[in-house]
Structure formats: structure tokens, C-alpha cells
Image (tube, rainbow, N blue to C red):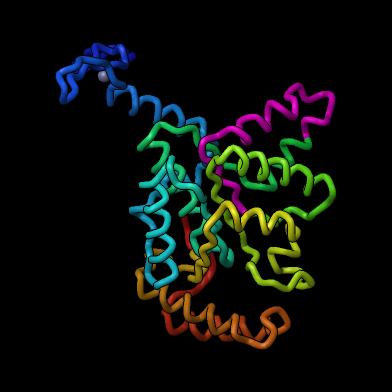
């Protein structure tokens, strides 16, 4: 199993090591080398996008109260897994770090427990399921759905981004309800705020429907993340820069109509960027 390396001294590469419990009974338990190897394989199978693979709880920069609260809750969930009864619903504007935190939870749980974890962007998942209806595609719908329904921990990123339809509703309800009734943990992220107004096109309830929303409240703790858009940050941004950007964003959001006020908001952004002494634009990666 180690290739050319020497066999594991604890288990001689069997994956089981003998222990003696306090009452003097000898038995075998899983060796740490097995757990590490399993976790490594399962992380490789978790479908985490390349640009999020570096994300951990330790490298998540929590520079305000909402972010600190979100990380603390994420850590509690990791520590409690698999006993935790509820998952997480991370909501907030684009770029606040929801996907980073969701991936960090997924990785930490897989690494600690060897659980089967799976990541999907919600729109991607629906696209893949839809593609199986094409007779030329040999994968069946069930082959795509089975791991989604049975993963010990599922991350569904960017919920509500898909335009709703009867098929989307049915498919999403199947996934969510199955996981709920099997008590499997799910972590969701969404850009759409959980406000009660179902006529507001940007409200979560408008995007996913009342039935799904109420189910999500039963199976998740909702956490609002309020922060800067990391994609707007200058290269080598420090915490102070992020706090400044976050405050600018709050001001922008406070305008009577953020969309109609686009020009004004952009002008303000330009002025604030001058204060920050950086030219703006996307940070290089
Ligand atoms: Zn071993």
C-alpha cells in the first residue's frame, strides 16, 4: 500500500492494529494510516473545484462579527459530526466566503472521520442530471443521483441560482427530502437573502418556493455572512483593506436603489479606491 516505502509499523499495512482495552481485552481497530489513506482518497472523490481546494477553516479570514460567528458555528459542526442533527445554510452576497467555508467544513469532516463527502454547484448538478436524459449519454440519472442522496455530507453551492421550473422543483425536493429523512447532513450556500417577501425576485423564498424553504429551516442552521467581496480586494490585501471594502459595500447597499444607483455607487467605489491607493479591478491570482 505504501509502494516502495516500508510497511506501516503499527499495522504492517493491514489497516488494522491490535490494541488492549482498559479491561485487558485484546482487539483490533482501524489504524491511523488507514484513516489517512481513506480520507485522502475520499477528498479526491469529493468533486471540490480546483479553485477551492486550498480552503480550510484555518485560512478563512474572519475580520468582523458575522464572519467570526460563521466560522465558530462551522467548527462546532465539524466537531459534532456525525452526531450533529442539523447542517448549515450560509447566506450572503457574492464573494463573502460562503463557498470557502462550506468547502472547509467538507474537508475537515472528511479528514477527521473518513466520511464520504461530495460538493456540487447546484446549477452544475442539475445540468449533469439533465444531460443523462440524452440517450447518447450512458450515465443514468440514478448513477448521478445516488452519491448525491447518500453522501454522508453534501455541499450544495449557490442554491437558488437555477431558474425554477416544475422539473427543478421536483428534483431539488427529491434530493433535499431524501437527505432530510435519512438524517444526512447538508451544507447549502446561497446569494439570496432569507427575507419573508415572496414577491421580491431576490428573496430566497421566491427562488426556491415556500415548501423547500421551510424544509431547509428544519434541517439547517441559517447563518448570514456580511462581508466584503473578496474578488474586489487588492492584491496582497490586509485585514484593514477588507474592512474598508466591507464598509464601502454596506454603504452601497444602503443606497435607496442599489441597481438604479449604479453610476453613483461606482463613482463612490472609485473615490474609495483612491483612498485605498489601489487601482481597482480584479485581484490577480
Ligand atoms: Zn497502519
**Quarter location, residue 71:** bottom left
Name the side, left or right, on which 36 lies relative to 284: left
Please say if 129 is above or below 211. Answer: above
Q: Residue 95: x and y, percent? A: 54, 63
For ligand 1, give the image quadrant. Answer: top left
Q: Quadrant of the N terminus?
A: top left
Q: Residue at x 47, y 75 (%)?
A: 246
Q: State left or right for residue 6 relative to residue 232.
A: left
Hey, which residue is sitting farthest front in the picture? 23
Q: How many marks?
A: 0
Observer-nearest of 248 and 272: 248
The percent coordinates of residue 97 (x first, y second) are: 49, 60
Q: Is residue 280 above or below residue 142?
A: below
Q: Which residues are magenta?
A: 131-158
* Front residue of this view, candidates 128 and 116: 116
The structure residue drawn at horizontal position 28% and vertical position 26%, both measured from the top left corner, is: 32
Residue under the image location 54 percent in, 68 percent down = 281
Amino acid at each position: 500500500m505504501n509502494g516502495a516505502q516500508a510497511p506501516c509499523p503499527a499495522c504492517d499495512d493491514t489497516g488494522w492494529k491490535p490494541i488492549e482495552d482498559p479491561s485487558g481485552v485484546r482487539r483490533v481497530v482501524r489504524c491511523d494510516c488507514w484513516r489517512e489513506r481513506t480520507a485522502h482518497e475520499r477528498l479526491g472523490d469529493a468533486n471540490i473545484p480546483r479553485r477551492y481546494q486550498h480552503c480550510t477553516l484555518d485560512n478563512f479570514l474572519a475580520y468582523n462579527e458575522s464572519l467570526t460567528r460563521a466560522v465558530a458555528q462551522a467548527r462546532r459542526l465539524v466537531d459534532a459530526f456525525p452526531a450533529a442533527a442539523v447542517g448549515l445554510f450560509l447566506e450572503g452576497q457574492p464573494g463573502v466566503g460562503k463557498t470557502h467555508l462550506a468547502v472547509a467544513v467538507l474537508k475537515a469532516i472528511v479528514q477527521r472521520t473518513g466520511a464520504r463527502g461530495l460538493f456540487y454547484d447546484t446549477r452544475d448538478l442539475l445540468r449533469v442530471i439533465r444531460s443523462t436524459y440524452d440517450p447518447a449519454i450512458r450515465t443514468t440519472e440514478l448513477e448521478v443521483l445516488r452519491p448525491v442522496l447518500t453522501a454522508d455530507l453534501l455541499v450544495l453551492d449557490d442554491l437558488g441560482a437555477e431558474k425554477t421550473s416544475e422539473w427543478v422543483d421536483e428534483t431539488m425536493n427529491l434530493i433535499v427530502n431524501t437527505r432530510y429523512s435519512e438524517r444526512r447532513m447538508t451544507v447549502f450556500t446561497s446569494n439570496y437573502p432569507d427575507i419573508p417577501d415572496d414577491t421580491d425576485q431576490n428573496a430566497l423564498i421566491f427562488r426556491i418556493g415556500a415548501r423547500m424553504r421551510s424544509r431547509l429551516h428544519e434541517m439547517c442552521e441559517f447563518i448570514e455572512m456580511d462581508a466584503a467581496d473578496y474578488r474586489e480586494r487588492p492584491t496582497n490585501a490586509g485585514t484593514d483593506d477588507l474592512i474598508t471594502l466591507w464598509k464601502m459595500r454596506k454603504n452601497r447597499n444602503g443606497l435607496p436603489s442599489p441597481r438604479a444607483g449604479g453610476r453613483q455607487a461606482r463613482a463612490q467605489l472609485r473615490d474609495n479606491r483612491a483612498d485605498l491607493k489601489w487601482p481597482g479591478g480584479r485581484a490577480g491570482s
